[in-house]
Amino acid sequence: MSAPAGATGRGFGRLLVAVYGIFAIASSARALYQIGTKLDEAPVAYLLSGFAALVYIVATVALARGTARWRTVAWWAVGVELIGVLVVGTLSIVDAGDFPEATVWSHFGQGYGYVPVVLPVVGLYWLWRTRTPRSATNHQEA
């Protein structure tokens, strides 16, 4: 799993971007359908699905771009994704009444083979792995 520094969308990163893209499309389609046809049945769950879809879209674009600015966006998007899946996953188990319908992140992504809980960990690792080294002057003592 090596790639040039800063190249989030190259090598293994291409596979990661592809998986994020698939999740962006799948979660967007699901959320649009749920919000458009039955929002009144489970508004919290369906709006969370919509939020998750937006996070996946932003993460996909940011990881694919890989520039310094987009890497910062990717760190935030993937970090929010991890927090979201951990919080929603926990709440959907502890207080199932708040989640009468599943979201992408319910039960830590059980409906998606737990990929939603693994994906941000891999994404954060990849961002860390492909980080650009600081310039030599930043490491020298004065």
Image (cartoon, rainbow, N blue to C red):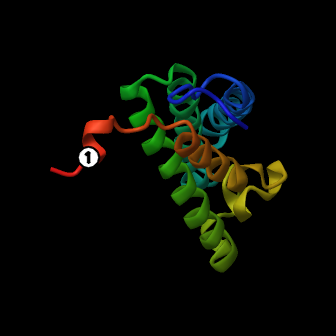
Task: In the displayed orientation, state which residue is furthest to the bottom.
Answer: 94
* Rendered location of residue 109, percent (x, y): 74, 55
Q: Quadrant of residue 76?
A: top left
Q: Looking at the image, can residue 39 be seen?
A: no
Residue 122 or residue 25, whichever sits in front: 122
Task: In the displayed orientation, state which residue is furthest to the right.
Answer: 113
Residue 60 or residue 14, whichever sits in front: 14
In the image, residue 43 above or below residue 70:
below
Q: Residues within 10 Å of mark 1 (few under 14, many from 20)?
A: few
Q: Quadrant of residue 8?
A: top right
In the image, residue 12 above or below residue 67:
below
Number of callouts? 1
* Rendered location of residue 138, percent (x, y): 26, 42
Q: Looking at the image, can residue 31 be seen?
A: yes
Q: Residue at x 57, y 48 (%)?
A: 124
Provide the secondary structure element on which disc 1 rests. loop
* Rendered location of residue 79, percent (x, y): 49, 51
Residue 75 or residue 83, whichever sits in front: 75
Q: Residue at x 53, y 45 (%)?
A: 128
Point out the image quarter for the N terminus: top right
* Rendered location of residue 135, percent (x, y): 33, 34
Q: Residue at x 71, y 61 (%)?
A: 108
Q: What residue does disc 1 label?
A: 140
47 to the left or right of 97: left
Identify which amino acid the numbered label 1 is placed on.
Gln
Q: Quadrant of residue 89?
A: bottom right
